Amino acid sequence: MIYLDHNATSPPRPGVAEAVLATMNRIEGNPSSVHGAGRAARQTLDEARRAVASLVGTHESRVIFTSGGTESNHLAILGVAEMAEFQGALVTSAVEHPSVLLPCAKAEQRGMKILRLPVDGQGVIRLEDLRVALDPSVRLVSIMAANNETGVLQPIREIGALCRQAGIPFHCDATQWAGKLPLAADAIPADLLTLSAHKLGGPKGCGALIVAAALQLAPQLNGGGQERGRRSGTENLPGIAGFGAVASLVVADIEAESARITSLREKLEEGLLKTIPDAFILGAAAPRLPNTTALALPGVDGETLVMTLDLAGFAIGSGAACSSGKNTPSHVPLAMGLDQELIRSVTRISLGWDSTEHAVDRFIHTFHRSVDRLRKGSLLQ
Ligand code: PMP
């Protein structure tokens, strides 16, 4: 199997499973316990926290461990909304992940005003729309760094600067950015930053919310007061240790990996467009993640193509993996102005740490043959 679906999840990088297993095997105590076993657990937790903090170039006290991107997004949005007693407004975009859009909708039901900024044909918000939206009633701006379906990047530096000028906190869902582009040293000027371990080759079910020192959040899980009272529940120590391990790996090679994946993706896109001239890439004219290609193929059913490729030994995504199983067209290409039929044709190829030139060559060949067969209406040729 050649795996080209890293935006759905990136398989554990070498060394991560070992860190998880070592924690399960060796750490007996609860990090909150004062005895030696507890202190050993606390040390593992602290080390992982330092590694995740260095991935973002921040202080370790800013890291809240969570169960993943979904929980981090809920904590950021509902944590701010609850502090504001569900008064005022939230600003987000039309192309956010459902784990941002749905807590926003929840806040809306509780009485907040939600502004969902539209995107242009490339999937990018217009800064002018944001500028106009930022009035004193706005409690939070939540805009993603990179889109999971298209890889399109939002102008986060400018968004961060506008929010700072207006004195409004900025939450950025960097779930897809982390591990694909450098993140350290204020690359994303956000007050709240969402990370998910499994998208960068760490364990599934583990993530973090990075919170600026001055920001007040209402905890969404209450109990034993872990994570300085901001997220109760005994920590998922094996997962967190795996997150720490992958964070250190990413910090060490992000520049080189990002350049390697960029050139692999160029080869992939050149090959695909050469063999299938009427295919087009979503957000091609916008800045994008180096690893993602969302391809629209007139007259082809994306789900069928994904299944055909699966049989041929390749794993790619159709639309958003997170919403697969649903029959409704994805909101992301819809917001970019694609028609329903074209949306159903979209497939997503997302490269990652285990992608090779050889795999890309084989994929281009098989992809082109599969599309040809589907267009001729037969799977048996
Ligand atoms: N945000 C984005 C942009 C994502 O791509 C995902 C995962 N598909 C999430 C949030 C949710 O992350 P998790 O799977 O860790 O809950």
Image (cartoon, rainbow, N blue to C red):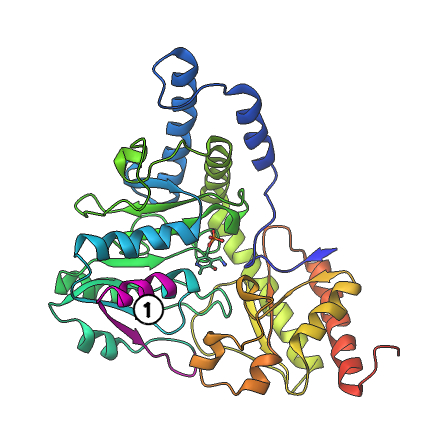
Give the farthest residue toward the left. Answer: 136
Q: Horizontal and vertical percent for residue 218? A: 23, 47
The residue wearing badge 1 is: 155
Residue 283 in sight here: no
The three-letter amino acid code for the residue at tag 1 is Pro
Query: In the rendered structure, which segment of residues is drawn in magenta?
Result: 102-122
Q: Say which element carries label 1.
A: loop
Left or right of 335 on screen, residue 256? right
Residue name at image x 28 percent, y 38 percent: 59
- The residue closer to the viewer here, 93 or 126, is 93
Q: Is residue 41 above or below residue 232?
A: above
Give the farthest residue toward the front. Answer: 110
Count the labels in the image.
1
Residue 115 in sight here: yes
- The residue closer to the viewer here, 44 or 182, is 44
Q: Is residue 288 above or below residue 67?
A: below
Q: Horizontal and vertical percent for residue 82? A: 22, 54
Q: Horizontal and vertical percent for residue 339? A: 52, 88
Give the farthest residue toward the right. Answer: 381
Residue name at image x 53 percent, y 45 percent: 204
Left or right of 379 on screen, residue 212? left
In magenta stretch: residue 119: yes
Left or right of 232 on screen, residue 346? right
Residue name at image x 73 percent, y 72 percent: 367
Q: Is residue 187 above or below residue 197?
A: below
- Quadrant of res 35: top left
